[in-house]
Amino acid sequence: MTEALYEIGRQTGIHVLMNSAWGWPTVESLHFLGLSLLIGAVGLFDLRMLGVARGVPMRAFHRMIPWGVGAYALNVATGFLFVTSAPDQYVYNPAFQVKLALMAVAGLNVLFFYRFVFARVRNAADDAPAPRSAKVAAAISLTCWVGVIVCGRLITYYRPPYHWCWWC
Amino acid sequence: MEYLVWLEGTAFSVWMRESGLAFFSGLILHALGMGFLVGVHVVTDLRVLGVAPGVPLPLMKRFRPVAGVALAVVIASGVLLLVAYPAKALTNPVFYVKLAAVAAALLVGRSLARGILSDAVHHGGRPPGSAGALAMLSIALWVTAITSGRFLAYTYNVLMASDPF
């Protein structure tokens, strides 16, 4: 699996970019910028549903969400550059594995939210508290994204001395 | 350099460096704090630039307490990381670029909050050009702060004052 990822990075020129002078830290900076925008759009929408900034109309503030989706796309793309440049540092790293799992939970939570909850949030009065189901979805979302940041920071700080990967 | 050597030798600085949990907690809190601090500011800038025009501008100020908490976390964790490796940051010009960018961005954010976000006339839609220019300056300053912060890990010349080479 790591060989295949590495081949993708080699054949697409990603390695040339990432090994160029300042390539890696520049892409890291973009990744952090994306993280901040994701927190700003999605995280603040979650906080609003949890009761912070009461009075901000949830329906109108939801127009920020596409910027969060764009930030997510930016971070999937920049994340792909890291992983294909040094796959063994990620695939075998429990911090990266937990990070992917939390992203999957956040994704399922998005599906749940828009399928069952969003209509009631959109129709709520500006000053009204969000319904309980929205608060649950918001809490799951915030917890997942905070966890994703923690795991992301852990990836480069702690490199396990052993390979731990049940699917390899 | 002498006071940096002294600071590195204090028990607290040694503990920050050698306790994996202490240093890692500093890194985590700094990343989370920056995420929320930049997030609140940039989303406010986007609103000033016309995104989500249905949100009344003054109400965007209600997210500022989140940025306040984030700033406190960023400063506290930043001081801890600085105490762990004082020479690493203080001898690197990029560190001062970061500090200046954050300070300027905070001032621009406050100026927007006291200006257009407190304006009784422009509640909805996109406010006039001068506010938009400030919002774009704010975004540019936060991008500078993030980029210089990330480059700190790659541009330092001295790791420890007591062991300069």
Image: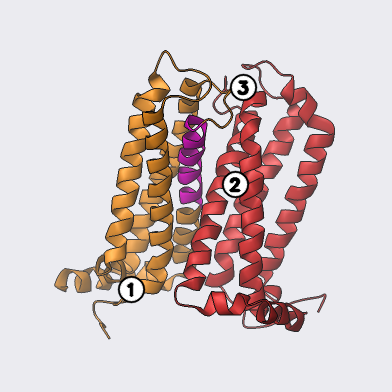
Asked if residue A92 is positioned above or below residue B29 in the image, the reply reads below
- Residue at the (39%, 20%) spot, across then down: B118
The three-letter code of the residue at mark 3 reads Pro
Tell me the distance, in whole angstroms, between the alpha carbons under discs 2 and 3: 19 Å
- Name the secondary structure under disc 2: helix
Q: Position of residue A45 (x, y in %)?
A: 62, 34
Q: Quadrant of the N terminus of chain B?
A: bottom left
Label 2 Cα crowd, 10 Å radius (few <14 / some 14-19 / many 20+): many
Tell me the distance, in whole angstroms, between the alpha carbons under discs 1 and 2: 29 Å
Q: Position of residue B149 (x, y in %)?
A: 40, 60
**Residue that carries the numbered disc 2 in the rendered image:** A38
Q: Residue B156, labelled with which disc?
A: 1
Q: Position of residue B4 (x, y in %)?
A: 21, 70
Is mark 3 in CB contact (under 8 Å) with mark 1?
no
Evaluate whether label 2 is on the same chain as label 3.
yes
Evaluate whether label 1 is on the same chain as label 2.
no
Color scheme of the displayed model? by chain
Instruction: Using the rendered view, name the quadrant where residue A123 is placed.
Output: top right
Q: Position of residue B6 (x, y in %)?
A: 20, 71
Chain holding disc 2 = A
Residue ranking furthest to the left: B2
Residue ranking furthest to the bottom: B165
Asked if residue A154 is positioned above or below residue A1 in the image, the reply reads above
Principal SS element in the magenta part?
Answer: helix
Chain holding disc 1 = B
Instruction: Using the rendered view, name the quadrant where residue A57 is placed.
Output: top right
The three-letter code of the residue at mark 2 reads Leu
- Name the secondary structure under disc 1: loop
Hue used for the chain lettered A: red
Give the magenta-colored segment's residue range.
Answer: B32-49
Chain that is coloured orange in the picture: B
**Residue that carries the numbered disc 3 in the rendered image:** A57
